[in-house]
Amino acid sequence: MKSDAKVTDATGARRYEAHVDGRLAGFATYIRTPEMVAFLHTEVDPEFEGRGVGSSLARHALDEARERGQSVLAACPFIAGWIAHHPEYEDLEYRPRSAVSD
C-alpha cells in the first residue's frame, strides 16, 4: 500500500519520523555509527495503522543506509520482518566478519 507519509531523519532524536497531514504517525529509532545503523524499535500510531506508514519508514531508512554505504542491524522485529519480505534489501543486513571458531 502506498502511504502519504512524509518521512524525515530526526537526527537529534535518533529516529526516523513519519508525518501524515503534519501529525506524527510513526517513528523508527536507531543507533548509527559510520559503518552501520542499528534499528531498535518501530512504532506506528494506531490511528495510522494499515496505511503503509511502517513500510514508508522502513523503505526510507533503508534507502538512506544504502546511500550512506552502511550495513543494517535489524534488532527491531518490524524492520527485520520488512527486510525478509523485501529481498532487494537483504544485502544491507549486517553480517559479522569474525572468523573465530571453537
Image (spheres, rainbow, N blue to C red):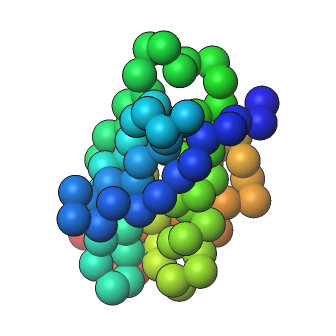
Q: Quadrant of the C terminus?
A: bottom left
**Outermost residue, top direction?**
47
Where residue 31 appears, as percent x and y from the top left, is: 26, 63
Q: Horizontal placement of 63 versus 42: left or right?
A: right
Position above or below: 87 against 80: below
Q: Quadrant of residue 41?
A: top left
Residue 23 appears at what percent x and percent y?
44, 33
Quadrant in which residue 33 is drawn: bottom left
The residue sitting at 22% across, 57% down in the picture is 13
Image side of residue 64 versus residue 45, left or right: right
96 with respect to 13 (left or right): right
Residue name at image x 37 percent, y 83 percent: 35
Q: Where is 23 relative to 36, above or below?
A: above
The one nearer the camera, 7 or 98, is 7
Residue 11 higher or lower than 4, as above or below: below
Measuring 75% from the left and 59% from the top, which residue is drawn there? 88
Quarter placement of the N terminus: top right
